[in-house]
Image (spheres, rainbow, N blue to C red):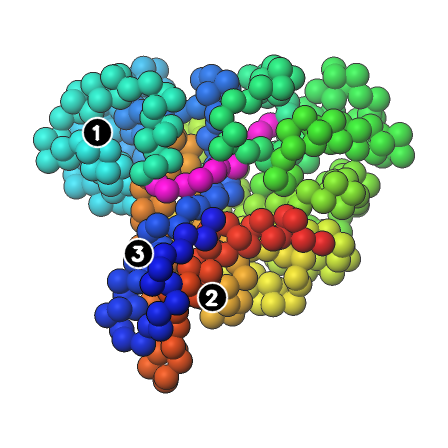
């Protein structure tokens, strides 16, 4: 929502006025967070929150092994509070917490009103045990000024299925995204068996018209159940399109037609190498540079399909912006995972704005733990404000003038308007 005030139409032509206006607008604008791994309360244990979850975030698990002598086996046999204790001691007490993932914990605790100078983990634990999840959701949404978040919903997850079937997913601020990694990336190993078990008449190689129809039926049922904002998949850097394997058949005969028919965009998250170090479990994924010719082909051959795209390799980001200039059916979003560090967010945001103006979704949080909405957005808002300041300043320097309402319009589009228009437009 565009939050205007009576001074919105005053011309801004002085730099100090510009700085304070941008800071104010960027901090007060509500955000639609288009990709998270958060869940509403009916999903039970899938909704993670609290200090022990914050400290055992997989980004921090990867970091603790670099500084502690703990073996993989010892670490994985610990309870969650023990793992959190180890991470706190190693990364926050024995070393200063300056990595982005560590700094995020400190930003979050501070924003919640906890005394970070006490360094007292049990004091932080006490705060969370005195809070209900419902109250905490309100606190976090208010603190981060996020209006709604898009979850990541796996239609094969036994913990999710009963909630969707009940028709009651609770808090409407949590919206759905139909995630299709199991179907697309592991069709032959597991997707096929799971579809068969659910009575879909598919064949193991997904090579018949009958199978395509069944997969389309599966997708349609889930689209009706979830009302997802988009369908999504994460893909390895060597993803190829066109493709004469299962992926290509799924794309061409199932996903792209359904995506068009139901006007549900297809989100591609390209560049993840899963389990580069399996000992690290969820923390063991890596990144690689993709060949974006495949993305160009997909966009060119499917002009009536909408694609949301984020990439995991820094080396791919400039090329992605150039592709964005060529295809209006592409919406670039977020600084994903290993890209979600201040220096890289700044570089990518500037690069995107210079090449694509205000026609991008600059950030998503990828929060896995509710509390993280606070730091991920606080840190990103600051960087986005700095980049916008630089760009508006260069206009004012040569005599262009701006109003606050124009800045509000621009920021509103970046933080939610572009997403809504992309979903709802034709
Ligand atoms: O595939 C994804 O959606 C990734 O974001 C996650 O799998 C990843 O583990 C993550 O949390 C990144 O931030
Ligand atoms: Zn994610």
Give the mark, 3 or 2, whose residue is nearer the N terminus: 3
Q: Is residue 405 above or below residue 251?
A: below
Farthest left residue in view: 118
Give the mark, 1 or 3, whose residue is nearer the N terminus: 3
Q: Does the magenta run of residues contain 340?
A: no
- Res 218 seen here: yes
Crowd around label 2: few <14 · some 14–19 · many ≥20 (10 Å)? some
Image marks 3 and 2: residues in contact by CB distance under 8 Å:
no
Question: Residue 205: where, in percent of width, then height?
Answer: 80, 31
Residue tagged by mark 1?
88
Which is nearer the eye, 398 or 268? 398
Residue tagged by mark 3?
24
Q: Is mark 2 within 8 Å of ligand 1?
A: no
Give the mark, 1 or 2, whose residue is nearer the N terminus: 1
Q: Is residue 405 above or below residue 239?
A: below
* Residue appearing at x 58%, y 49% in the figure: 420
Which is nearer the eye, 254 or 138? 138
Tell me the quarter of the image containing the C terminus.
bottom right
């Amino acid at each position: 929502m565009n939050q205007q005030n009576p001074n919105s139409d005053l011309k801004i032509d002085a730099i100090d006025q510009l700085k304070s206006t941008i800071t104010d607008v960027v901090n007060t604008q509500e955000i639609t967070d288009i990709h998270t791994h958060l869940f509403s309360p009916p999903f039970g244990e899938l909704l993670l929150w609290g200090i022990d979850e914050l400290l055992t975030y997989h980004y921090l698990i990867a970091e603790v092994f670099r500084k502690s002598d703990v073996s993989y086996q010892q670490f994985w046999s610990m309870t969650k509070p023990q793992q959190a204790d180890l991470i706190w001691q190693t990364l926050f007490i024995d070393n200063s917490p300056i990595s982005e993932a560590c700094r995020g914990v400190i930003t979050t605790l501070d924003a919640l009103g906890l005394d970070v100078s006490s360094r007292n983990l049990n004091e932080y634990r006490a705060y969370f045990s005195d809070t209900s999840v419902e109250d905490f959701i309100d606190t976090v949404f208010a603190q981060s000024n996020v209006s709604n978040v898009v979850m990541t919903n796996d239609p094969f997850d036994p913990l999710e299925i009963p909630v969707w079937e009940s028709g009651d997913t609770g808090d409407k601020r949590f919206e759905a995204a139909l995630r299709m990694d199991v179907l697309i990336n592991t069709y032959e190993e597991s997707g096929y068996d799971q579809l068969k078990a659910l009575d879909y008449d598919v064949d193991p190689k997904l090579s018949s018209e009958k199978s395509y129809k069944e997969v389309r039926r599966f997708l349609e049922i889930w689209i009706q159940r979830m009302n997802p904002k988009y369908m999504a998949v994460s893909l390895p850097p060597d993803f190829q399109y066109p493709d004469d394997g299962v992926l290509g058949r799924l794309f061409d005969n199932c996903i792209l037609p359904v995506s068009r028919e139901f006007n549900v965009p297809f989100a591609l998250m390209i560049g993840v190498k899963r389990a580069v170090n399996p000992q690290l479990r969820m923390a063991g994924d890596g990144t690689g540079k993709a060949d974006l010719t495949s993305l160009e082909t997909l966009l060119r051959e499917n002009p009536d399909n909408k694609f949301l795209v984020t990439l995991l390799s820094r080396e791919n980001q400039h090329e992605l912006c150039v592709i964005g200039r060529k295809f209006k059916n592409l919406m670039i979003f977020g600084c994903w995972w290993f890209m979600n560090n201040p220096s890289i967010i700044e570089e990518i945001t500037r690069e995107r704005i210079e090449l694509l103006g205000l026609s991008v979704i600059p950030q998503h949080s990828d929060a896995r733990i509710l509390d993280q909405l606070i730091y991920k957005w606080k840190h990103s808002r600051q960087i986005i404000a700095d980049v916008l300041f630089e760009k508006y300043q260069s206009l004012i320097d040569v005599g262009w003038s701006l109003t606050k309402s124009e800045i509000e319009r621009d920021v509103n589009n970046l933080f939610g308007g572009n997403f809504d228009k992309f979903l709802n437009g034709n």
